[in-house]
Image (tube, rainbow, N blue to C red):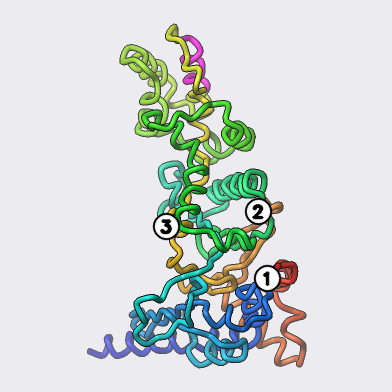
Amino acid sequence: MKKDVISSKKQQDEYNNYLSMLSLYYEYLYPTGYIQKWLSHNSTDPNVFKRREFALLKRDAKKNKIYTRNVSIKSEEFFRTMLLNELPFTIEIGAVMNKRPLSAKLSKNYCPVEKELIFDIDASDFDDVRTCCIGKQICRKCWKLIVVACKILKMVLTEDFGFQDMLWVFSGRRGIHCWVCDKNARSLTKEVRESILDYLYLPFRLFKRNDDLLVKWNHPLIQRTLKIVEEVFEEICLEDQNLFSSWKNVEKFLVAEVPGEQNRGNLREVLGNVMDCGSVVIWSAFCAVLDSLEQPRNEQMDLVGCIKLYLLYPRLDLNVTKGLSHLVKTPFCVHPETMKVAIPFNPDKVESFDIETVPTLPALCQEIQRCLAKNVSVTKMSLLNHSLSLFRDFVTKLKP
């Protein structure tokens, strides 16, 4: 009984400490003003922000979740006061609705009318490729998978769709969010969003080869993507992940893709002899066997290139992109488990983004307390300065 009391007190103390840190963070660093401008797209019409749906996730001392959707925020001042009063662990945002969201019962004709085009990529979606981590874990090695995905997604959105106003945010744990804020993107219907996803998934459909859509290997999207992938394939898949050191992966990604049972049998024999030599050697042996096959290669596809694309192409959370009612965490939220802040980053410098040095809530609160003790402006000393500056610059350039 005594142990339960001690454990309960410890739990309560940790909870109170977390709330104290959130209070400091929301008061001194969370950019409520620029979040409001961003979600209003610099519009002078206050109804744009008022009709935006918010959701708050809170937890009690026993980590039970309390989730409230359809929250309406009428002003920046109200937003700031609400955060300090409620101290939510997570703040999520949805679409601009046709009416102000209310916590009370909603009318039947309540519906979304506008929302950014959002893409969500998590390292856990590459669990069949990464060997260094699994699930919610992430390290510098598997972060490279996110880097490649970011480069490809940015290229497609910019070159193929002409989007310009894209906000890129580290999610706080193991992935990234891309918010496409162009005016024409915000008004897209669910059907159009699904069509964009269909286009983005052409390389995967090519790899399956049983799709009723005939995808040409020389399609510009596939060839431009392949250039990005080929530059990093050996480093990521063969060296960092040593992907083919497992026979299960050899069977799944290499042997299964070769046509003809006799060819597959020969390949198994060749690769079995070099299984102790590492993935670089195994991949070289695989390519050599492919070159020696008498069976003519499919003119529609380069199998080696197709495998590279499949392993490194972006894996998107489809529901986040197509769902107008789907909610996503705001930038500058604190992840309740990692304590890291969801910070914006420059996609052109994503290779230098270090997930291990992302500011955490405890570090920021220590910084705030030092500044207050010395009577120094918190915003001038903050570890978030660079990220806040990126966000301010992005918001300032947005068009209503």
* Image point (57%, 78%), residue name: 362
Type of amino acid under label 3: Asn
The residue indicated by pointer 1 is 400
- In percent of width and height, residue 22 lies at 54, 84
Secondary-structure class at tag 1: loop
Left or right of 175, for residue 377: right
* Image point (46%, 89%), residue name: 16
Secondary-structure class at tag 2: loop
Residue toward you, 103 or 382: 103
> Farthest residue toward the top?
294
Q: Is residue 230 visible?
A: no
Extent of the magenta region: 284-292
Q: Is residue 128 magenta?
A: no
Q: Is residue 69 visible?
A: yes
- The circle on residue 20 is none
* Image point (60%, 88%), residue name: 75
User: Could you give the CA–CA distance between mark 2 and mark 3, rounded to whole angstroms?
Assistant: 20 Å
Task: Give the mark, 2 or 1, whose residue is nearer the N terminus.
Answer: 2
Task: Give the mark, 1 or 3, whose residue is nearer the N terminus.
Answer: 3
Left or right of 77, for residue 380: right
Foreground mark, 1 or 3, reads: 1
User: Could you give the CA–CA distance between mark 2 and mark 1, rounded to whole angstroms?
Assistant: 15 Å
